[in-house]
Image (tube, rainbow, N blue to C red):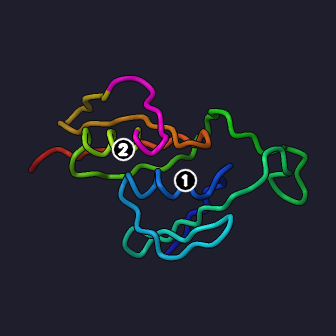
Amino acid sequence: MFEVCIDVENAEQAVEFYRAIGLTLVKSDSGWARMADGDTVFWIMEMPFSSSASPASEIPRSYQRHWTPVHLDFVVADLEATVARAMAAGGTMEGPIQERPGGGRLANVVDPSGNGVDLVQRPAK
């Protein structure tokens, strides 16, 4: 098992976004939330803008849109409906829905704190 930690500027807003794409809220308090998708735990952690990314790092946290080679893919049953909920919860979409080889579909979405995630609809069997 593994757990995912997502640093955000506003935990309440992030909870609404991640609920919109299918995560379940397990527990929350001021500045944090524990969410889940099955056995996978997602920690939503409100971290101050420009605070150090780690004790040994001088790299400050920044919440404008950023790219990282590691990102999360969320498999959804209804891509259009999930995209609509994500946008209503403060997300933004980067480009149109893409048709993928083999019949799958993908939407590049950004959470309210600038974290990019992909919403993926697998092809019908």
The reply to whether the magenta stretch includes residue 92 is: yes
Please say whether residue 87 is one of the residues in the magenta stretch.
Answer: no
Give the CA distance from mark 1 to mark 2.
Answer: 16 Å
Judged left or right of residue 108, residue 14 is right
Q: Residue at x 55, y 52 (%)?
A: 13
Q: Residue at x 11, y 47 (%)?
A: 124
Q: Which residue is mark 1?
A: 14
Q: Amino acid at mark 1?
A: Ala
Helix, strand or loop under label 2:
strand
The vertical placement of 65 against 117, above or below, is above
Using the image as rendered, state which of residue 88 and residue 40 is in the foreground.
88
Give the image quarter of residue 107.
top left
Magenta residues span 88-96
Res 119 label: 2
**For this view, does 19 lie left or right of residue 14?**
left
Q: Nearer the viewer, residue 61 or 17?
A: 17
